[in-house]
Amino acid sequence: MKKWMLKVAEEQMLTDRDRGYCIYCGEEAYGVEPDARKYECEACGKEGVYGLEEMLLMGRVEIVEEV
């Protein structure tokens, strides 16, 4: 199974501090702490929402110049 990766601009890493993403379906979630782990996803129902900084530590974020 291929690991789901998120591509974000460096600027987005600094400004989107309350966003998270589901590692199962890719759905974006708001109001999520940067270090959030295993929050329930409203889209797929799985406990796969992680904060952006936590995803970076997990190796699931690729920082690019522009998205």
Image (cartoon, rainbow, N blue to C red):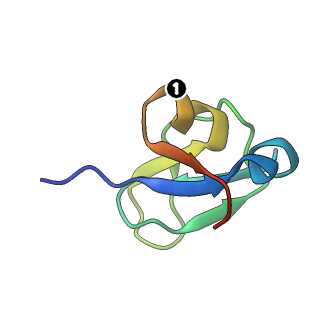
What crowding class fits label 1: few (fewer than 14 Cα within 10 Å), some (14-19), or many (20 or more)? few
Indicate the quadrant where residue 37 lies. Answer: top right
Q: In this view of the protein, which residue sits in the foreground, 45 or 61? A: 61
Residue at 49% over, 55% down: 6
Residue at point 44%, 30% (across, down):
58
Query: Residue farthest to the bottom?
Result: 43
Say which residue appears at 58% left-offset and 31% top-offset. Answer: 54
Q: Is residue 46 above or below residue 28?
A: above
The residue under label 1 is 57
Q: Nearer the viewer, residue 52 or 13?
A: 13
Quadrant for the C terminus, please.
bottom right
Q: Position of residue 19 (x, y in %)?
A: 72, 53
Report x, y in % for residue 35: 66, 29
Mark 1: secondary structure: helix
Percent position (x, y) of residue 53? 65, 34
Check disc 1 and give the amino acid type. Answer: Leu
Horizontal side of 14 relative to 39 (left or right) equals right
Name the residue rendered at 42%, 48% in the picture: 47
Position of residue 64 in the picture relative to residue 5 (left or right): right
Camera-nearest residue between 20 and 11: 11
